[in-house]
Image (tube, rainbow, N blue to C red):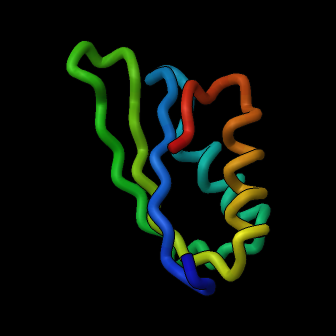
Amino acid sequence: MEFPADFTMKVFGNTEINLEAIVVAAIRAHKVDVERLHIAARLSSAGKYTSLTATFHVESQEQLDSIYRELSSNPEIIMVL
């Protein structure tokens, strides 16, 4: 992958948490331009889980890795892809 680049990340969590706020805060904390952030949410068929697809612009592999580590270490998040 060449940087800078747009990247799409999927994040899964329980519906009762504000998953979008967690994802936006993590991305913003790593100096990503949130004006270029696009998020689409989808509920599971039973409505228990939410999946977010976040597309954003990253400047480096290190920046991307930091976002991934922060999100995947959050106990409220089930999975990050």
Left or right of 66 in this view: 2: left
Q: Relative to 73, is 63 above or below?
A: below
Name which residue lies at 30% across and 38% down: 42
Looking at the picture, how far across and down is residue 27, in whole percent? Answer: 67, 60
Name which residue lies at 76% across and 45% down: 70
Towards the viewer: 80 or 17: 80
Residue with the most extreme front position = 1
Name which residue lies at 60% across and 49% down: 23
Q: Quadrant of the N terminus?
A: bottom right
Q: Relative to 72, is 58 above or below?
A: below
Residue with the most extreme left position = 45
Looking at the picture, how far across and down is residue 18, in whole percent? Answer: 55, 34
Looking at the picture, how far across and down is residue 8, in whole percent? Answer: 45, 61
Towards the viewer: 12 or 48: 12
Looking at the picture, how far across and down is residue 34, in whole percent? Answer: 59, 72
Q: How many numbered markers are drawn? A: 0
- Determine the image quadrant of residue 25: bottom right
Name which residue lies at 46% across and 46% down: 10
Left or right of 46 in this view: 81: right
Q: Relative to 74, is 63 above or below?
A: below
